Amino acid sequence: MDNAAIQIDSQHSWTGFYQKLADKLLAYRNDRQTLISMLNDAYSRTGMQLPKLEADELNDIDPFTVFGLFNKGITDANRRKIIAVIAEVFDIGADQPTDFEGIPVLNNLNATFYAFANDERRSEHDIDNLWSVFEAELALDADDSEENRKAFVDAFDATVIQFSLGWKLTMGLYWARPYSFISLDSRNRWFMADVAKAGSAIANAVPKEKDSPVHDGERYLAICDTIKSELRSEECPYTDFPSLTAAAFVESERVNQERKAAEKAAAVKAEENALGDEGVRTTHYWTYSPGDGAARWDDFYARGIMGIGWSKLGNVEQYASKEDIRKSLRTLYSSKFSQKNSALALWQFSRELKPGDVVFAKRGRSVIIGRGVVEGDYQFDDNGDSYPNIRKVRWTHGGKWQTEDLLAMKTLTDITAYPDLVAKLDSFFEDEDGEPEEGSGAVEYPAYTPEDFLSEVYMDAERYGTLANVLRAKKNIILQGAPGVGKTFAAKRLAYSMMGVKDAERVMMVQFHQSYSYEDFIEGFRPNAQGFDLEKGTFYSFCKKAQDDSDNDYFFIIDEINRGNLSKIFGELFMLIENDKRGPRNTLQLLYSHELFYVPSNVYLIGMMNTADRSLAMLDYALRRRFAFFELRPAFDTESFAAYQEGLASEKFDRLVACVVKLNEAIASDESLGDGFCIGHSYFCRMSPDDVTDEKLSEIVDYELVPMLREYWFDEPSKVDEWAGKLRRSIQ
């Protein structure tokens, strides 16, 4: 390890600067107050706040934490800004880094090498120990003697066991002397443990990425020596530690991008496979406080933005969940409070607030001071502002409007679920004719045509035409069929195709069950602290919404319609849902409120019923008369499914489908079952060629098809075994 002359590699522009900074820092081991003063001076010159490095006032610091100030989750621009000032304050003549590729960085939630002073896990000598291992490192780099090795090992062993260190300590060692001490952060360990990437000698020497105990100093030096001896070998093409670490960075970024792309694709696929809402945008409405007491309103209004604080968190997108944000808030701000509301506000601001949403700016709990339409995605503006989390907003109004309703105290609140409140706030911004002002934030919904329906639902154009025409004429239809024929999948898509757009605000889905009642559906009394309130049900509210928008069609979808007590649920609406009984000329008095109510002519009902559910009674005859029935069948014989199947190009998939077709013939001919129990095509849909693996096909057979057969032929186990064997052999 004899590197007395500082090494500088043009490929890694940062190494020279980092090594010279380490030399400068060593001079302050016994003068840490001066060091702290210099750091405060440096940050004051940047115009940025010194990060939180202690629970209260900063009275001590170690050299690795100094490096950590610009080696954590901040933008490269801010890293360069900090380094430029540090170079000036510490009089470092080396070229400043131009890029930071491959440099390991700290987690913003754990950006010091010590526990805070008020933490019981902090010992009296923790920071002194960090200085000792730092000094020993520089001495060993200058002179690889047995004496210096022993001194380093002793210092390392005393330090590595301290709270929050472990492998993290090797990151600090690497920053200070990147050609002599390897970083064993998780990314490097993952990369070097791969024989194909680093060679067998290195792969066998380094600890595994996870669940590996932290090694002592002697073992750590042995790892450094092993890797160094393998550099430039045939198995390890890298020239030095920085080259190896940079390769780990590039590879991990590639893998992470692939993972994120796969997760995004899976999320899209899951959404597509659910209820047909992919690509659907609905307008949400929010109340928002622009700073404490609306102190930032004038600034935000002039700049056309909205912003929220908690700047110490950094970019909120780095957190995977609201819980991660909450934990960080408790660490960085205050553990006296749960921080749930603050975490929710940050999550909603960064993830859920969307362009097109309407924002009502407020002061306190009863004064509206502005209205705007969100125009931009989440941004983290790391410029030292205490409100770095921002969104572009087109503020349409500014002023002062008093509301009688007490608004939530929270910084950001989604009020979409309170249409009465939204209507009251929106009324402040109507013109003289009572129409909303221009720029109300109306959403342009994506188009959805019958062709789009046919591209997603395996049905020929003729049957789709029949289905749409029957629903248009009858107003009410039930999609019935065997398990897996895509009833739920098709329902919303049918509604969208008839509307011509994916407007989810005009579609509502509920699911009936044995406990679903008239009170849930139409209206009923609900208990409160004072007694009972009369509350309106889902169908009542949906019909009222449709009445106010008579120029557009609305679709009410009922899943498992035959699972509810239909006479009880529909009550007097048996009559009103008939096609020729729609509209204001046909009113009936409701049971509880005695209100005269009617079902608008622009409301369509789509029910779904599983014909294989033997536990359910037939639909009430009075209701059956009012619905048309359309059977969805397994679509294995359709041209669209054949095209989909051809695109997968899988012989095993083809054999499995052929076996299921024969199975359906057996089910249909079984006197105890029949067509209504055939297996549908949806078990095999929404797959890509990469999805058609042996594992996936086996899962379909063993966890979806065979259990269904056991239910069908519960009294004929031999028949279950026969067909289970045929299905499994088809994919072997």
Image (cartoon, grey):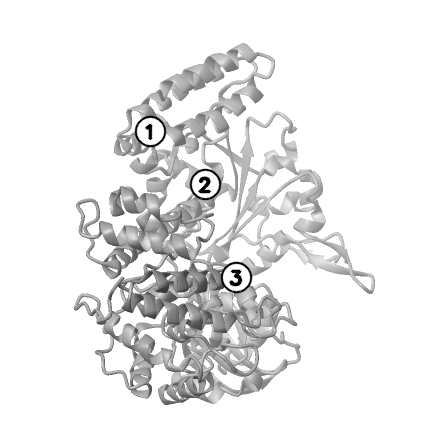
Whole-percent x and y of residue 546? 54, 58
Amino acid type, label 2: Phe
Residue positioned 48% across, 67% down in the render: 109
Residue holding disc 2:
489
Tell me the quadrant of the picture where the C terminus can be found: top left
Q: CA distance from mark 3 to mark 1?
A: 48 Å
> What is the C-alpha distance between the residues marked 2 and 1?
17 Å
Q: Nearer the viewer, mark 2 or mark 1?
A: 2
Q: Is residue 394 left or right of residue 2?
A: right
Q: Count the labels in the image.
A: 3
> Dot 3: what SS?
helix
How much space separates mark 2 and mark 3, taking CA atoms?
34 Å
* Relative to 563, residue 274 above or below: below
Report the front residue among 600 and 322: 322
- First along the sequence among labels 2 and 1: 2
Q: Residue 638: which disc?
A: 1
Determine which of the numbered discs, if any, sits on residue 324 in the image. Answer: 3
